[in-house]
């Protein structure tokens, strides 16, 4: 009996000790659970913070449609370095065209630089606010407005796209063939941040192309391209001038049709040797009939402007020929062999981006221009060439069927050459490296000369064609001449036209698979899992 009582007291003591330890165990378990919750919350906060501060945006498009170019990244880096904030106000409806493209592109600008602040305004939802800002910025159409301080640049939505209407001839719908958002947005940022506007002088007095759109031979296409890059374009009479104005950043000779006087060439020579920048576009112009004084020394029948022997001293050999293309794949439908496509580029910054994206140029009535022996301290480089089947016709006065002769140069023929001082090339490389690090690169002091065997490369109908690289080439060339590296190599991007063509049978099976087959598979999988668990229990 005593033993039984002793056992009973032992059991009661054990239960009492277990009762006392139960609250302590609950406290421990609760503490561990709370600590786990706090740890998970802390991890979530840390992950979100690093995701906000250090994040990457992926571009799954085949053409890297939304990926910012290195040039745009450099411009955005300069904003961070200068501590300059830029406000962007978008006046576009969410259901409108290009809204998604603009939204995605600007989000990448914001992600790249904390100095970019984007504000979206829907005219339907916020009419009063929109009207106030419309009055403030002076815009009347759908636009993207960039502003800093009292400066602003507006990019119209109509400028962002290039439309291809070729399908309308066969009952189709117009299509967006090129999206120019990055090019225009980066240009607007450069316009807001640059301190000086490059002054470009176009010579007159020798039958050159004019800036006036109403002139029979004009540079309307070139003006349209450069106007977006904020150049100050002026005409300048070389005759009677003692020197090129000191504040000129670039001198352009565009398609002369008469000869230059020796005194004029001396002025240009002094300017170039002093570190000036000169662009020459020389067409193969027929000499006046009835006289040989204007003919070239090669008796080709082409006009001698007096520039050819002078340019040869700088390492540029201008051919006395008319370049003709025999490769049918390079010809332009409806035109002769004098109008052709060029897609063989070098790696020079002016044309490197065109070669990477395989964007062609069209030239019409061009002459060959090749790299010769440059003077000491300079180097001459080609930009692009014809196909191997092209040739340079040296007898343009012949009425017989054109065919390569014994003295005609054979392809591939160079059509454009640039000459730059070697110290200028070093400065350019250093400037590009500085741009990559987010620092400004000072302009080089050496000369820069570019010679192109065709002035029609900047014709309005060619630079306006969305499938060609003429507009990008003109912009790249002028920006390179005045050393605006930030705007080099940002051509329009071609949007991907993705279409899914299905027959009526394929469409029915697709609908059946989505609405019946997939849900049925999910239900069967659930029943199988339930039955397995029931048997296991």
Image (cartoon, grey):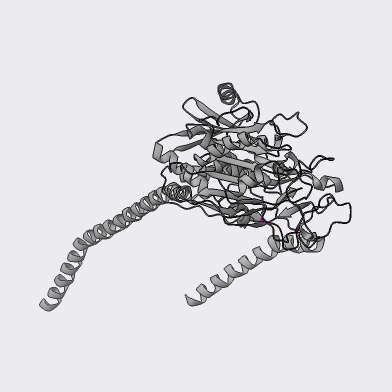
**498, above or below 287, in the image:** below
295 on left or right of 237: right
| Residue 350 visible | no
* Front position in the image: 501 or 344: 344
Q: Tell me which secondary structure the magenta stretch mostly adopts.
A: loop
Spot occupied by residue 412 in the image (x, y as percentages of width and height): 69, 61
Residue 208 placement: quadrant: top right
Residue extending farthest to the left is 2
Residue at figure coordinates x 42%, y 34% from the top left = 84
- Nearer the observer, 121 or 87: 87
Q: Residue furthest right?
A: 400
Residue 134 quadrant: top right
Q: Position of residue 479 (x, y in %)?
A: 56, 42
> x, y percentage for residue 329?
78, 60
| Residue 182 horizontal side relative to residue 96, left or right | left
Give the camera-side residue of 336 and 433. Answer: 336
Is residue 504 in view from this perspective?
Answer: yes
> Which quarter of the picture shows residue 234?
top right
**How many numbered marks have been drawn onto this rendered protein structure?**
0
- Image quadrant in which the N terminus is located: bottom left
Query: Is residue 273 magenta-colored?
Result: no
Residue at horizontal 58 percent and vertical 37 percent from the top: 266
- Range of magenta residues: 385-391
State left or right for residue 220 relative to residue 154: right
Q: Residue 506: x percent and y percent?
A: 78, 63
Residue closer to the observer: 154 or 192: 192
Q: Is residue 291 left or right of residue 187?
A: right
């Amino acid at each position: 009996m005593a033993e039984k009582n002793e056992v009973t007291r032992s059991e009661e003591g054990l239960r009492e000790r277990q009762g006392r330890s139960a609250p302590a165990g609950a406290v421990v378990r609760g503490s561990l659970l709370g600590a786990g919750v706090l740890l998970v919350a802390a991890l979530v906060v840390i992950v979100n913070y690093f995701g906000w501060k250090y994040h990457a945006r992926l571009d799954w498009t085949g053409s890297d449609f939304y990926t910012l170019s290195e040039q745009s990244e450099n411009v955005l880096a300069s904003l961070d370095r200068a501590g300059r904030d830029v406000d962007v106000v978008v006046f576009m409806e969410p259901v409108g065209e290009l809204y998604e493209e603009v939204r995605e592109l600007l989000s990448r600008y914001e992600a790249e630089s904390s100095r970019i602040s984007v504000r979206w305004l829907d005219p339907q939802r916020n009419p009063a606010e929109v009207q106030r800002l419309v009055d403030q910025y002076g815009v009347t159409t759908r636009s993207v407005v960039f502003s800093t301080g009292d400066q602003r640049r507006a990019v119209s939505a109509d400028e962002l796209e290039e439309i291809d209407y070729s399908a309308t001839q066969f009952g189709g719908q117009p299509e967006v063939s090129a999206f120019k958002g990055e090019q225009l947005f980066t240009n607007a940022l450069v316009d807001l941040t640059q301190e000086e506007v490059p002054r470009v002088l176009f010579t007159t007095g020798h039958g050159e192309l004019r800036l006036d759109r109403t002139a029979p031979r004009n540079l309307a296409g070139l003006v349209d391209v450069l106007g977006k890059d904020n150049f100050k374009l002026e005409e300048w009479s070389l005759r009677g001038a003692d020197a090129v104005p000191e504040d000129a950043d670039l001198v352009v000779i565009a398609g002369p049709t008469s000869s230059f006087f020796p005194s004029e060439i001396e002025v240009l020579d002094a300017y170039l040797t002093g570190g000036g920048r000169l662009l020459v576009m020389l067409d193969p112009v027929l000499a006046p009939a009835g006289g040989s004084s204007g003919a070239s020394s090669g008796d080709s029948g082409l006009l001698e402007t007096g520039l050819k022997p002078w340019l040869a001293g700088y390492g540029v050999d201008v051919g006395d020929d008319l370049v003709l293309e025999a490769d049918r794949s390079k010809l332009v439908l409806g035109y002769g062999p004098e109008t052709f496509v060029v897609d063989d580029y070098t790696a020079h910054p002016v044309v490197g981006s065109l070669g990477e994206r395989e964007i062609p140029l069209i030239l019409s009535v061009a002459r060959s221009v090749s790299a010769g022996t440059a003077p000491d301290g300079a180097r001459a480089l080609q930009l692009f060439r014809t196909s191997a089947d092209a040739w340079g016709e040296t007898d343009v006065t012949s009425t017989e069927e054109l065919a390569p002769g014994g003295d005609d140069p054979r392809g591939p023929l160079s059509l454009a050459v640039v000459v730059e001082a070697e110290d200028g090339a070093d400065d350019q490389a250093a400037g590009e490296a500085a741009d990559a690090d987010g620092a400004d690169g000072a302009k080089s002091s050496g000369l820069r000369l570019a010679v192109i065997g065709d002035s029609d490369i900047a014709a309005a109908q060619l630079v306006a064609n969305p499938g060609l690289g003429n507009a990008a080439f003109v912009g790249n060339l002028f920006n390179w001449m005045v050393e605006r590296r930030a705007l080099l190599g940002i051509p329009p991007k071609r949007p991907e036209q993705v279409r899914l063509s299905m027959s009526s049978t394929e469409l029915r099976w697709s609908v059946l698979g989505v609405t019946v087959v997939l849900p049925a598979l999910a239900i069967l999988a659930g029943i199988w899992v339930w039955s397995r668990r029931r048997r296991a229990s």
